[in-house]
Image: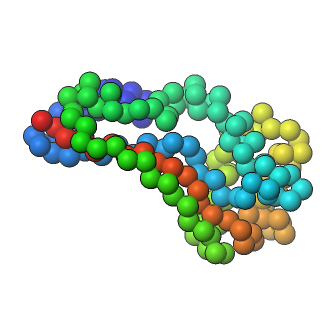
């Protein structure tokens, strides 16, 4: 959302009086690998995410924002705010493997210039579906993240 204030005002104006609107904010991007993975480059996923922080700060400055004041400024009454912790064990789930692969492919595109050659090579091994180190072959994946949800009502 390039202009959150404008978008919230538009939603407010379109919503029926008394209507409920929910905003779900990504507190951070999901993590999939254990902290000590991959074995030859422990902590790789965290370094990849740190490498994208500058890009996201520039292009999505409201990521992680407190939407309560923005909702109030747009004319909403904030009814509730909750933070949800997501921790879904993979148990060799194909769906989690595909999700992890897709997310890390996107992360690679942004993180590559800031990663060391060793980290980039390790990430490429994880993303190479033919590699024995492919993320799709791992049995220790999980989805770990947090989301904050604001429920707001138009008066």
Q: Taking the image as drawn, is residue 98 in sight?
A: no
Q: Is residue 101 above or below residue 78?
A: below
* Residue nearest the viewer, comparing 153 with 52: 153
The percent coordinates of residue 31 (x first, y second) are 64, 53
* Residue nearest the viewer, comparing 118 with 65: 65
Horizontal placement of 36 versus 109: left or right?
Answer: right
Residue at the (82%, 45%) spot, across then down: 120
Query: Looking at the image, what colour scheme do you see?
Result: rainbow
Horizontal placement of 39 versus 110: left or right?
Answer: right
The percent coordinates of residue 16 (x first, y second) are 12, 42
Residue at the (41%, 32%) spot, across then down: 66
Quadrant placement of the C terminus: top left
* Residue nearest the viewer, comparing 135 with 26: 26
Horizontal placement of 50 versus 95: left or right?
Answer: right
The percent coordinates of residue 100 (x first, y second) are 64, 59
The quarter holding residue 9 reads top left
The quarter holding residue 111 reads top right
Quadrant placement of the N terminus: top left
Q: How many marks?
A: 0
Q: Taking the image as drawn, is residue 103 in sight?
A: yes
Residue at the (67%, 45%) spot, across then down: 107
Residue at the (83%, 52%) spot, across then down: 42
Q: Is residue 151 above or below residue 61?
A: below
Horizontal placement of 136 versus 85: left or right?
Answer: right
Q: Is residue 37 above or below residue 140?
A: above
* Residue nearest the viewer, comparing 112 with 25: 25
Outermost residue, left side:
17
The percent coordinates of residue 141 (x first, y second) are 67, 65
């Amino acid at each position: 959302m390039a202009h959150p204030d404008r978008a919230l005002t538009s939603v407010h104006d379109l919503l029926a009086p008394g209507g409920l609107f929910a905003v779900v904010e990504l507190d951070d991007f999901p993590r999939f690998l254990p902290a000590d993975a991959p074995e030859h480059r422990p902590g790789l996923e965290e370094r990849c995410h740190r490498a994208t922080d500058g890009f996201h700060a520039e292009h999505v400055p409201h990521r992680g924002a407190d939407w309560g004041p923005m909702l109030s400024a747009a004319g909403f009454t904030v009814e509730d705010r909750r933070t949800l912790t997501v921790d879904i064990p993979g148990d060799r789930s194909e769906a989690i493997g595909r999700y992890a692969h897709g997310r890390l492919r996107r992360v690679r595109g942004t993180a590559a210039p800031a990663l060391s050659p060793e980290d980039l090579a390790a990430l490429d091994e994880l993303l190479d579906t033919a590699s024995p180190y492919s993320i799709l072959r791992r049995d220790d994946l999980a989805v770990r993240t947090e989301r904050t949800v604001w429920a707001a009502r138009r008066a």
